[in-house]
């Protein structure tokens, strides 16, 4: 009887212990998340450089925690913030250029991205933002900071096991090929796509040299469905449709990228390189808006929704009544609600392939 009573007490003790042990997220597969790319993933680096391409003012951030404009080009969080949360890493990702980032935030990852940049160096020259080459320099600085704070062995562990997200390319085609046809004097669309993929190839090899092993490379969105691209073609508010030619070319680029990534993974021993499809999730929303609770997919929430973005989406610009009904917050960038759906899709892709 005494043994039975002791057994009950022990079971009760272990039950209490289990109830008070903090739960560990089943999705926490990465110690850190590191971000490179453009405005779709820039969490605020452009706040700290001299460029007109900024989102550090209202109405950006109006639905972010604390209702604070942070430099994110949306009404709230970006897909990379939401992904970091879903993977159990952290709730938001700080920009690397933010002063005095706490050590625990450095340990779990930062963002090096810069709105307006691209794989083509000419893109960053036009917009006066951080090219990917500069983002790599900041990555090296970040590694040195980790070495100093946590020691070389732990720093290497963090970098080697971090999830690295790379999202760029849209600005290259918009700024250099469609709207400002600088590169069209040198390339046709097929050759320019291959040029961009070669620039990405070089970037991936540099990340690998610096210790990155697990990379998620985002493809192009349906560029022809961005409100600003529709405006450049149709110049009107009503009766708007996506620019089909640009969407076909985005799909062609994505197909090439999808075929290219396994080859480079094979050439980089120990690497895991995953393609993230954002084209199809966004097109699914555009083709079936009611299914996802959207009312408007052809214009942005800010201002007329035709051209407003960055410096011309301002505190005095009129806003739509409910940004969660809009696929796009401004004429280029999705709303937080749209990013939420895309993030769920990317998470499934990552977990399936990794």
Image: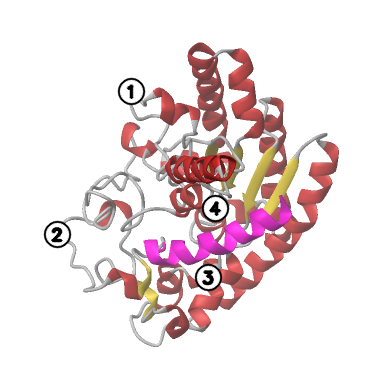
Toward the front, the furthest residue is 1
Tag 2 secondary structure: loop
Residue under label 2, please give it: 316
N-term mark: 2 or 1: 1
Residue under label 1, please give it: 100
Q: Residues within 10 Å of mark 2 (few under 14, many from 20)?
A: few
- Asked if residue 246 shows in the view, the reply is no
Residue under label 4, please give it: 176
Residue under label 3, please give it: 282
N-term mark: 1 or 3: 1
N-term mark: 4 or 2: 4
State yes or no: discs 1 and 4 in contact (Cβ < 8 Å). no
Mark 3 or 2, closer to the camera:
3
Tell me the tag on residue 338.
none
Residue found at x 73% / y 52%:
194
Q: CA distance from mark 3 to mark 4?
A: 23 Å
**Residue 130's x, y, as percent?**
47, 35
State yes or no: discs 3 and 2 in contact (Cβ < 8 Å). no
State yes or no: discs 2 and 1 in contact (Cβ < 8 Å). no
Q: Which quadrant of the view contains residue 52?
A: top left
Q: Is residue 17 above or below residue 339?
A: above
> In the image, which residues are magenta?
334-354
**Residue 120's x, y, as percent?**
59, 43
Q: Foreground residue, 115 or 306? A: 115
- Residue 335 on the magenta span: yes
Q: CA distance from mark 1 to mark 3?
A: 36 Å
């Amino acid at each position: 009887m005494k043994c039975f009573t002791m057994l009950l007490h022990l079971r009760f003790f272990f039950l209490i212990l289990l109830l008070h042990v903090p739960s560990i997220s089943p999705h926490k597969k990465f110690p850190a998340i590191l971000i490179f790319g453009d405005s779709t993933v820039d969490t605020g680096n452009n706040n700290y450089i001299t460029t007109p391409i900024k989102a550090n003012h209202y109405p950006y951030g109006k639905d972010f925690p604390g209702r604070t404009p942070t430099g994110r080009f949306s009404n709230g969080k970006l897909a990379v913030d939401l992904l970091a949360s879903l993977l159990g890493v952290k709730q938001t990702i700080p920009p690397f250029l933010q002063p005095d980032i706490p050590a625990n935030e450095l340990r779990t990852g930062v963002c090096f991205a810069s709105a307006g940049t691209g794989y083509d160096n000419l893109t960053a020259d036009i917009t006066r933002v951080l090219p990917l080459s500069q983002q790599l320099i900041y990555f090296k600085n970040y590694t040195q900071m980790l070495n100093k704070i946590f020691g070389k062995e732990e720093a290497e562990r963090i970098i080697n096991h971090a999830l690295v997200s790379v999202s760029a390319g849209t600005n290259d085609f918009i700024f250099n090929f469609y709207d400002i046809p600088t590169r069209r004097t040198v390339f046709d669309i097929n050759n320019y796509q291959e040029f961009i993929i070669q620039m990405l190839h070089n970037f991936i090899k540099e990340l690998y040299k610096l210790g990155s092993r697990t990379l998620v490379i985002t493809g192009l969105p349906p560029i022809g469905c961005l409100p600003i691209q529709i405006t450049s073609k149709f110049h009107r508010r009503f009766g708007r449709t996506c620019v089909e030619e640009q969407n076909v070319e985005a799909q062609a680029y994505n197909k090439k990228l999808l075929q290219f990534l396994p080859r480079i993974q094979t050439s980089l021993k120990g690497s895991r390189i995953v393609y993230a499809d954002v084209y199809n999730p966004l097109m699914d929303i555009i083709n079936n808006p009611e299914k996802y609770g959207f009312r408007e997919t052809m214009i942005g929430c800010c201002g007329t929704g035709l051209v407003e973005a960055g410096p011309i989406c301002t505190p005095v610009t009129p806003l739509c009544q409910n940004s969660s009904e809009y696929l796009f917050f401004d004429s280029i960038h999705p709303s937080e609600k749209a990013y939420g759906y895309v993030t769920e899709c990317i998470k499934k892709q990552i977990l399936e392939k990794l």
